[in-house]
Image: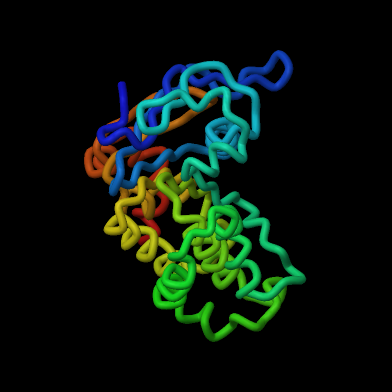
Amino acid sequence: MSAPGGALAIRDLAVSYGKVEALHRASLAVAPGRIVTVIGPNGAGKSTMLNAIMGLLPAAGTIEHDGESIARLETEARVGRGLVLVPEKRELFAEMTVADNLALGAFPRHRRRDKGIGDDLEAVYARFPRLRERRAQLAGTLSGGERQMLALGRALMAKPKVLMLDEPSLGLAPLIVRDIFRIIADLRATGVAILLVEQNARAALQIADYGYVLETGEVVLEGPAAELAANPRVVETYLGLARRAG
């Protein structure tokens, strides 16, 4: 299996914490301009997968970007290739302003003397008007939804080729979740490959092109997102309560 267009492909990825295997021979592919989601319960290994792809955890298996193995590269080198992770806890610099957090997202590009940073900052402000309004405000004083927008904006300032999102809806009100997922769906048009890890299966499958179900460290189901959303097992396990509530 390889990612069409060469964005990202992992094969037989395995991660262990001591004698406990948190991820067992997981394989997936993400192509440019596509949204692929990984859904599953808490503790299934979803965040472990993202951290392994970024080189933050030791892992066995194959990780390829643009058809080349990156398994031996340090995390910084993977970021340099265009892999960017928005972690579950967002990890913003609370005592710095919105504008400074965004500038930090482009730090590797500054070192390369990339001339497009100013234009990309304007594009982020156009995508997130609230961030423009709050640009002089400290990140630690933002609302949950605004912090998630800032985390996304900061990631976009790195000009990612592969954007990985870990539980972007976590702790947000339903209306804000809707806005965040609309923004993620709109990013598809930029050509970036998006790997979306979510417990909110309903929202994730609505915007994704393809999906994987991860349970106890193993991929147990995969397919086009619309097919997964109609799969009786997925409906019963991940969508049932949401559908009855809706």
Query: Seen in the image, is 23 located left or right of residue 184?
Result: right
Q: Nearer the viewer, residue 242 or 26?
A: 26
Query: Seen in the image, is 233 located left or right of residue 19?
Result: left
Q: Nearer the viewer, residue 169 or 127?
A: 127
Vertical position of residue 44 compared to residue 235: above or below: above
Vertical position of residue 66 compared to residue 240: above or below: above
Q: Nearer the viewer, residue 107 or 240?
A: 107
Q: Quadrant of the C terminus?
A: bottom left
Q: Quadrant of the N terminus?
A: top left
Q: How is the image coloured?
A: rainbow
Across and down, in percent, residue 140 comes to 72, 72
Q: Residue at x 68, y 75 (%)?
A: 97
User: Hey, which residue is sitting farthest bottom in the picture?
Assistant: 133
Taking the image as drawn, is residue 240 in sight?
A: no
Across and down, in percent, residue 165 comes to 49, 49
Vertical position of residue 236 compared to residue 28: above or below: below
Number of labels in the image equals 0
Find residue 122 and report its image quarter. bottom left
Q: Residue at x 56, y 67 (%)?
A: 150
Vertical position of residue 178 compared to residue 44: above or below: below
Q: Residue at x 57, y 23 (%)?
A: 72
Across and down, in percent, residue 185 comes to 33, 59
User: Hey, which residue is sitting farthest front in the picture?
Assistant: 113
Across and down, in percent, residue 67 comes to 36, 27
User: Hey, which residue is sitting farthest right in the picture?
Assistant: 95
Q: Nearer the viewer, residue 189 or 232?
A: 189
Q: Residue at x 50, y 80 (%)?
A: 130
Taking the image as drawn, is residue 225 in sight?
A: yes
